[in-house]
Image (cartoon, rainbow, N blue to C red):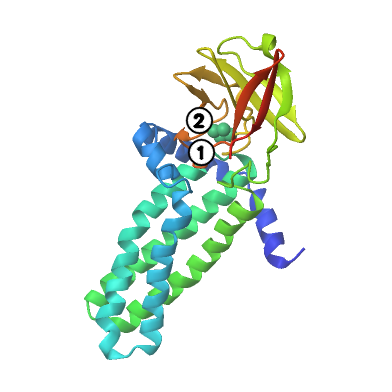
């Protein structure tokens, strides 16, 4: 294990961070309750998590500002200041989308998220102070603060990478599920009652099969958000609601219609042959 892994492992055990995380989670969950806010911050309109896209903007702007500070000379001062300001403005929606993603995490993952947020707030404060120093004509101070902010931002980026790539936050939990291209036997049609999901297995993939208003519909059973069991969810208005964090997927095609999930659920075509329900992956 390298030094950084060791440090993050220790951070994951700092239970005192829960004292900050728990009330922050409650406040965030309240703020993102409206469907439109939740969907937008989760990335439903694009089908991809919004936070990963937005982070590029302030990080890119602030990195370029420091580059201009270091090698751009006097003629680049205005451009560097504009980049610092652009980073400050775009950091706000970036933070909001990150908080939304973090609000569904608990335990070790949540603690890393709290540290990630604390470093981002520190970086933001350093850049805000840098901007004020630049406007007051104290360029050397402004440059120094921005460079320090960039260092803090890099440390925070490491934790952000840990959350996504090691802890799987906002990773599509069905990414490696491949349903059969040919029809496969799933279950007896007589097992299906309207609105009551049943579980079927197609090779290694678990599929939720449901009869909804007379139509047989099937989705991958593992929620794309964090892997919740959709067969334990509620069926209403042509959708299934995940029992873990409330994501909703349309039964007819798996589209995510309510966050926090951004990725659609793999869906299956269904037919009945000799009283048996057969399924195949929707092309
Ligand atoms: S696991 Fe989070 S909404 Fe399904």
- Between 209 and 240, the one nearer to me in the picture: 209
Spot occupied by residue 226 in the image (x, y as percentages of width and height): 60, 38
Reply above or below: 185 against 203: above
Circle 1 sits on which residue?
261
Labels 1 and 2: the sequence-earlier one: 2
Q: Nearer the viewer, mark 1 or mark 2?
A: 2
Spot occupied by residue 200 in the image (x, y as percentages of width and height): 71, 24
* Residue depicted at x 49% and y 42%: 262
Reply above or below: 41 against 138: above
Per the image, label 1 sits on a secondary structure element best described as: loop
Circle 2 sits on which residue?
249
State the image quarter where residue 178 is shown. top right
Spot occupied by residue 219 in the image (x, y as percentages of width and height): 60, 29
Spot occupied by residue 86 in the image (x, y as percentages of width and height): 30, 66
* Residue depicted at x 54% and y 54%: 115
**Ligand 1: does it lie within 8 Å of the C-beta at label 1?**
yes
């Amino acid at each position: 294990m390298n030094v950084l892994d060791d440090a993050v492992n220790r951070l994951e055990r700092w239970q005192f961070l829960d004292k900050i995380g728990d009330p922050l989670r409650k406040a965030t969950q309240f703020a993102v309750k409206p469907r439109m806010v939740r969907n937008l911050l989760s990335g439903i309109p694009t089908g991809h998590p919004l936070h990963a896209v937005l982070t590029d903007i302030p990080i890119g702007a602030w990195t370029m500002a420091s580059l201009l500070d270091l090698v751009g000379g006097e003629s680049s001062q205005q451009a560097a200041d504009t980049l610092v300001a652009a980073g400050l403005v775009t950091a706000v929606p970036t933070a909001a989308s990150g908080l939304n993603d973090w609000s569904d995490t608990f335990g070790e993952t949540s603690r890393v998220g709290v540290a990630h947020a604390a470093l981002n707030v520190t970086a933001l404060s350093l850049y805000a102070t840098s901007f004020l120093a630049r406007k007051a004509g104290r360029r050397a101070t402004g440059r120094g603060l921005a460079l320090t902010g960039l260092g803090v931002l890099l440390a925070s980026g490491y934790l952000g990478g840990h959350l996504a790539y090691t802890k799987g936050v906002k990773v599509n939990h069905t990414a490696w599920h491949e349903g059969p291209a040919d029809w496969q036997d799933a279950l007896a049609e007589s097992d299906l009652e309207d609105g009551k999901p049943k579980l079927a297995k197609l090779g290694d993939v678990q599929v939720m099969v449901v009869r909804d208003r007379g139509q047989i519909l099937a989705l991958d059973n593992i929620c794309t958000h964090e892997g919740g069991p959709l067969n334990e969810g509620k069926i209403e208005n042509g959708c299934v609601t995940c029992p873990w964090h409330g994501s909703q997927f349309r039964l007819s095609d798996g589209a995510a219609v309510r966050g926090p999930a951004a990725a659609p659920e793999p869906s299956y075509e269904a037919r009945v042959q000799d009283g048996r329900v057969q399924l195949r992956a929707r092309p």
